[in-house]
Amino acid sequence: MAEIVPTTAFVIGKKRGAEEEEDGGAGDQWALLPKRTTVGDPVAALASARHEFGEHGGVNMSIEASATFTVMEADTMRRMFSGELGPDRDFFIYSRHFNPTVLNLSRQMAAIEGTEAAYCTASGMSAISAVLIQLCGAGGHVVASGRLYGGTHALLSHFLPYACGIRATFVDIDDLEAVRAAVIEGETKVLYVETISNPTLAVANVPRLSEIAREKGVKLVADNTFAPMVLSPARLGADVVIHSVSKFISGGADIIAGAICGPASLVNSMMDLHKGALMLMGPTMNAKVAFEISERLPHLSLRMKEHCNRALVYATRMRKMGLKVIYPGLDDHPHHSLLASLSNPGYGFGGLVCLDMVTEERANKLMHHLQNTTQFGLMAVSLGYYETLMSCSGSSTSSEMSPEERAQAGISPGLVRMSVGYSGTVEQRWSQFERALSLLHPLPKQQQQQPV
Ligand SMILES: Cc1ncc(COP(=O)(O)O)c(C=O)c1O
């Protein structure tokens, strides 16, 4: 006979109607979170987060598939809308606001990133735009890294100025004095970076940038899409961490999703019924998606280790062949020692490798053979999938940038970005790579690098 599990002991907050027994915490949706986690390791922190059981004692949490939620007393509705009763006590209004399943995933994301709170969104772009709008307001100013994903670059250089007067100054974030000088007192609200940049794999010096942010009274927002588990930007000083969950965190190339991890005050402000960017623009996550992602978090660290391990093997071998390869795990990468000093132990240097084929034509030829002749990987944008994904960044995910901006960011026309997968064996994949490359020889002079 099945053991009877006291499931009510494990559900979020208090049961409906229990508000009279509860003291304090009114309006604080995060009262049940551990305070900013003291666990420094994301895996340990995730395991320390509360495990949610299913409604009938299932080992997996239940999916709360409802868009709307009923109450037992008519007055409870008023008390929920006034902020007196909230999700911390199991009072939910409507799933564009808080949804229990999305909230559970968000608690896990907060644990991984070591932030006080988190909330998940319909996409990475909606997470970025909602945070920037919330933190900047109309007419605010952002100091942004010049090395950003093309979509984020377009958001900052075209859409936000057009839609709400938010302006951006792009700087080389290696130049800390330039960062400091770009901050406009009273106007700059956000310093925006990617921890490992798309596609150039430059590493942000989060501790030093966070010192500047604190000194200048602005928020450091770090997009950690390329380095979940590998880097913990909030533990290094970032105020807000953003993810495109569509990438490594999902791992299946089957979901578009995002996450915002940061202080409870920020997440609560984004959910405000009158002025909240998430509540009012509405890019919240679906509960079924939240369940899917939550099931994949326990093996995220294992997946990341294998992505990183294979990326290092391939980058090292590519370099030995004399190819022009960009990978922060190689000791000639300008940020090699910086990343080694900032990363969580055991992960290595990230799961992406860039190969500079100099011209778009050669990049395309190589990708053609890698996909269609030897089956090394797939020509597709995005990253974090178990198969290797390859794209020529200049003509795809960075095509929103002007040729000058791409040149300044270090994106050559022949740059092939590879998100290294873990399907097949390392040697099987490597021989596929070698075979495809052999169909391209000889290498043009500029592309050859001294073997090391
Ligand atoms: C670094 C980075 N941030 C954000 C995004 C946007 O995420 P999504 O596609 O989930 O909206 C991407 C997408 O490629 C990305 O590479």
Image (cartoon, helix red, strand yellow):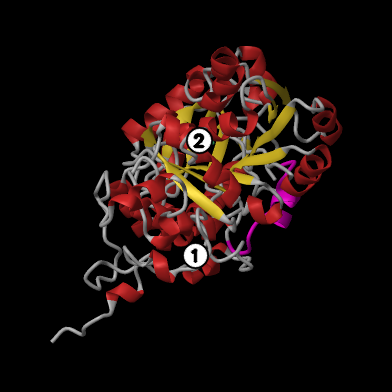
> Is residue 250 in view from this perspective?
no
- Residue at 34% over, 47% down: 93
Residue 115 in the figure: left or right of residue 188: left
Residue under label 1 = 32
Q: Position of residue 263 (x, y in %)?
A: 61, 50
Q: Residue at image x 76%, y 49%?
A: 207
Q: Is residue 164 magenta?
A: no
Q: Is 16 displayed left or right of 331 in the figure?
A: left
Residue 260 location (% of width, % of height): 52, 44
The location of residue 249, given as percent across then percent down, is 44, 50
Q: Which residue is mark 2?
A: 276
Q: Quadrant of the C terminus?
A: top right
Is 428 positioned to the left or the right of 116 in the image?
Answer: left
The structure residue drawn at horizontal position 61% and vertical position 36%, both measured from the top left corner, is: 197
Chain part drawn in magenta: 332-346
Q: Was residue 334 drawn as part of the magenta stretch in this picture?
A: yes
**Measured Cα–Cα span from mark 1 to mark 2:** 22 Å
**Left or right, 52 with reference to 164:** left
Q: Which residue type carries mark 2?
A: Gly
